[in-house]
Image (spheres, grey):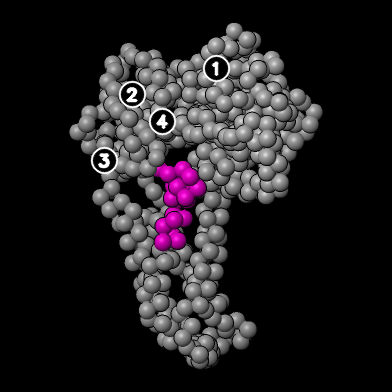
């Protein structure tokens, strides 16, 4: 087992040990023993009696109910982790009939049998039977939530059921449509191409769909192909999406990369996930976003209220506006901003287009007539962006990432720049700490691709630390 995978196992095991032990002790004290005044004394006497009979070398200091409960949870988790059904979720299986209920039932049966055996062997015989019955259902819920990153990601704003996929050359009655990986995701349609000669057309179709839809998973039935053109292979590896390839022959790749391969129904399934903000990485990023955005909101609350009053005095309502922007994997969301322009200013982009001296994607006007008095100051120091802290808390944005653009702007993205849709858009980013005044699309492109290629939580933290200095030292005209 690789060190990184071993570290994840140990980290998750430690987290579950701490969480379930703390919950078990709390529940035991608050509910299981709440009705029995002398229950603790009875159980301690039983434990001391067993110690004298079976393990007299243990000192009295270790004969404590909490220690026994912690050891019980530890042994249970060791057994649980030795089972495949809990530690490994295979997306390429057909076991979809039971879905989450069947997975929960397996955990419930194992937990309940261990719990009852523990209570019987160590004579915890004065607990409330009613609350014990309820307890048997609660811990499996915790275990199911933290079984894999998908469930926890759903709680943090990225649910599998909100993801979508497209298929190529996969018939509606194909057995592979029963794979777990497709079961919980939305089908955007199946498209038929000549697999041997139309790879470029597949690329064009993927990019076209992704400009209009949220796209997370690409499934291609290669039929009897045993390899991919090098350009198409590189394209799939660089899409930063989940890719499933189905072929009657085992595939040979030009590049070396991490993938999962299996043989099902006389076909070979090759799956790789290059979504860079997925699973544990997404969870850690969201935890960072939620923590920091809450702290920032509390610190900046007086300033936020003052800005709201200023806007109301200058131009009445609305104080905060929302605009359709494109987010993670092409999902359109409402982005919040303090209003710095007169009402309906965005609709005037067309008639003012002659004043725009920048690229088609970046729309900025020198001394923009749509901005009311005082609005330029808010935009200069990006104070108009503060309401996006709510977008961050909702999981639509991150503190760090490429700035979210309008829906109509995505039509100018080439197949390489489409990758910017595969990370959460951000309040700040590499562009903002380097060249905040940049009006050339090539500059935006450079920093966005650099961020995607080098993304890590460490990079996010560095950008966050440098952002205040960039606000002070550089002038900004806002987006």
Which residue carries the number 3 mark? Answer: 178
Answer whether labels 3 and 2 touch (C-beta < 8 Å). no
The stretch of residues the image draws in magenta is 141-160
Question: Is any atom of residue 361 visible in this view?
Answer: yes
Q: Which mark is residue 348?
A: 1
Q: Residue furthest right?
A: 473
Quadrant position of the C terminus in the picture: top right
Q: Earlier in the sequence, mark 3 or mark 2?
A: 3
Number of numbered discs = 4
First along the sequence among labels 3 and 1: 3
The residue most toward the left is 173
Q: Is residue 292 magenta?
A: no
Looking at the image, is mark 3 or mark 1 nearer the viewer? Answer: 1
Horizontal side, residue 54 vs residue 388: left or right:
left
Q: Quadrant of residue 429?
A: top right
In the structure shown, which secondary structural element does the residue marked by tag 3 occupy? helix
On screen, residue 132 above or below 388: below
- Residue hosting label 2: 226
Quick check: marks 3 and 1 in contact, CB under 8 Å?
no
């Amino acid at each position: 087992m690789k060190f990184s995978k071993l570290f994840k196992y140990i980290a998750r095991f430690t987290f579950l040990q701490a969480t379930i032990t703390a919950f078990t002790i709390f529940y035991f004290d608050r509910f299981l023993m709440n009705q029995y005044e002398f229950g603790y004394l009875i159980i301690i006497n039983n434990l001391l009696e067993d110690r004298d009979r079976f393990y007299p070398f243990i000192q009295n200091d270790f004969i404590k109910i909490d220690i026994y409960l912690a050891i019980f949870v530890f042994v249970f988790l060791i057994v649980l982790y030795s089972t495949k059904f809990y530690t490994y979720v295979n997306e390429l299986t057909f076991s979809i009939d039971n879905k989450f209920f069947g997975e929960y039932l397996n955990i419930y049966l194992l937990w309940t049998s261990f719990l009852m055996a523990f209570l019987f062997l160590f004579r915890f015989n004065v607990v409330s039977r009613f609350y014990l019955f309820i307890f048997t259902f609660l811990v499996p819920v915790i275990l199911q939530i933290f079984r894999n990153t998908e469930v926890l990601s759903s709680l943090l704003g990225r649910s599998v059921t909100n993801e979508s996929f497209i298929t190529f050359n996969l018939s509606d009655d194909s057995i592979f449509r029963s794979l777990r990986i497709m079961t919980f995701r939305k089908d955007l349609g199946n498209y038929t191409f000549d697999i041997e000669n139309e790879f470029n057309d597949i690329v064009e179709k993927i990019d076209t769909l992704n400009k209009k839809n949220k796209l997370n998973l690409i499934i291609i039935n290669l039929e009897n192909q045993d390899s991919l053109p090098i350009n198409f292979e590189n394209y799939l590896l660089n899409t930063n999406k989940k890719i499933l390839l189905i072929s009657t022959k085992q595939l040979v790749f030009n590049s070396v990369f991490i993938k999962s391969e299996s043989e099902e129904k006389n076909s070979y399934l090759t799956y790789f996930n290059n979504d860079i903000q997925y699973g544990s990485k997404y969870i850690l990023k969201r935890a960072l976003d939620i923590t920091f955005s809450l702290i920032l909101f509390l610190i900046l609350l007086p300033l936020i209220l003052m800005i709201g009053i200023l806007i109301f005095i200058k131009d009445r309502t609305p104080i905060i506006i929302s605009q359709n922007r494109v987010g993670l994997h092409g999902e359109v969301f409402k982005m919040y901003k303090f209003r710095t322009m007169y009402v309906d200013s965005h609709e005037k982009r067309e008639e003012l287009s002659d004043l725009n001296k920048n690229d088609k994607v970046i729309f900025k006007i020198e001394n923009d007539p749509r901005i009311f008095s005082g609005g330029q100051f808010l935009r200069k120091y990006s104070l108009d962006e503060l309401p996006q802290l709510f977008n961050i808390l909702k999981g639509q944005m991150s503190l760090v990432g490429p700035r979210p653009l309008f829906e109509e702007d995505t039509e100018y993205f080439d197949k390489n720049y489409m990758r910017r849709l595969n990370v959460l858009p951000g309040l700040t980013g590499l562009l903002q700490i380097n060249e905040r005044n940049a009006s050339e699309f090539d500059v935006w492109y450079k920093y966005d691709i650099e961020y995607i290629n080098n993304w890590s939580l460490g990079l996010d933290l560095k950008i966050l630390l440098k952002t205040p200095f960039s606000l002070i030292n550089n002038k900004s005209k806002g987006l």
